[in-house]
Image (cartoon, rainbow, N blue to C red):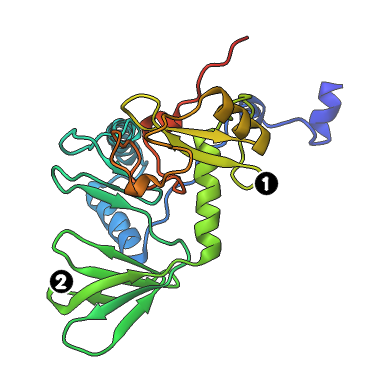
């Protein structure tokens, strides 16, 4: 049968048979036109007709990328634990931004769909694009439809406005809530912010503010009856923004969904 398949051209090729279970190779990154031309020019200088030298250089590049990935992942773990990656102090965490008051380090999300508006300093007009990037010297690159439409020196603009749509804000809130693994403080079921009966409260039974989520009105009321707040604080009814009777762990008041490191940890459940 094998001879017949070979005669009819149905026998699989040796390389394909050997590699059929191998994972597909990742596609190479796209180079811009000028970079591709430089790559071909450098290959001609090396005299690398068979591609041996380029393969060795590619392996070195992969090692550099792996080292950079390890450094980036370590930095992200520091952020997730609520610490500044620059000085190690505590971060002020918000839904779309993190700020270190100690050294000034900060990071923030920008709208994925834009637009962004750049207010020029000496002209009564703005430049609008989909995205903008600030490079080291303060120069601003404004992009629209994946094209750079303006390169603005730091001395030529005053400020940048990021325009958020209500739909994108709501989508980001849902994504963050899903990552936080919110658990009902009474029945330990999953608490979904978008569902009717969801409650988010901040209560300080001791000296420190804590946050609890509840999946329904019944769970919230049962928790309140079991764990009444101290009379002089009245945490269930008081606005946290106007209260100074405990140590705050969350920047906003009881209506906020600001995050700290412990919010990303799912408490172990009894088996």
Q: Quadrant of residue 88?
A: top left
Q: Which quarter shows the N terminus? A: top right
Of labels 1 and 2, the one closer to you: 1
SS under mark 2: helix
Residue at 63 percent across and 24 percent down: it is 187
Residue 161 is situated, as x and y percent measured from the top left of the image, at 33, 71
Residue 22 is situated, as x and y percent measured from the top left of the image, at 59, 28
Q: Residues within 10 Å of mark 2 (few under 14, many from 20)?
A: some
Task: Estimate the spatial distance between the alpha carbons at disc 1 and disc 2, rounded to whole Å.
Answer: 48 Å
Left or right placement of residue 26 versus residue 271 in this view:
left
Q: Is residue 239 above or below residue 40?
A: above
Residue at 36 percent across and 41 percent down: it is 51
Q: To which residue does mark 2 refer?
A: 154
Residue at 35 percent across and 40 percent down: it is 250
Tag on residue 196? 1
Q: Nearer the viewer, residue 235 or 250?
A: 235
Residue at 33 percent across and 38 percent down: it is 58
Residue 134 visible in the current orientation: yes
């Amino acid at each position: 049968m094998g001879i017949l398949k070979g005669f009819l051209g149905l026998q699989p090729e040796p390389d394909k048979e050997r590699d059929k279970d191998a994972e597909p190779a990742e596609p190479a990154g796209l180079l811009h036109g000028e970079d591709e031309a430089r790559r071909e020019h450098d290959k001609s200088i090396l005299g690398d007709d068979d591609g041996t030298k380029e393969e060795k250089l590619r392996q070195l590049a992969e090692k550099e990328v792996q080292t950079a990935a390890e450094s980036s992942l370590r930095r992200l773990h520091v952020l997730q634990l609520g610490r500044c990656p620059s000085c190690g102090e505590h971060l002020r965490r918000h839904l779309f931004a993190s700020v270190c008051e100690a050294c000034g380090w900060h990071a923030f999300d920008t709208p994925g769909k834009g637009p962004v508006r750049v207010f020029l300093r000496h002209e009564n007009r703005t430049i609008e694009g989909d995205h903008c990037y600030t490079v080291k010297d303060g120069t601003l690159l404004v992009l629209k439809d994946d094209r750079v439409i303006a390169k603005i020196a730091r001395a030529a603009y005053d400020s940048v406005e990021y325009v958020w749509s209500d739909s994108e804000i709501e989508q980001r809130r849902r994504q963050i809530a899903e990552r936080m693994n919110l658990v009902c403080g009474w029945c330990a079921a999953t608490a979904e912010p978008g569902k009717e009966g969801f409650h988010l409260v901040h209560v300080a039974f001791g000296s420190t503010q804590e946050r609890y989520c509840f999946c329904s009105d019944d769970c919230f009321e049962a928790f309140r009856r079991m764990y009444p707040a101290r009379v002089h604080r009245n945490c269930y009814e008081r606005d946290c923004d106007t209260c100074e009777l405990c140590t705050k762990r969350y920047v906003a008041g009881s209506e906020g969904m600001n995050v700290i490191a412990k919010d990303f940890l799912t408490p172990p459940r009894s088996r």
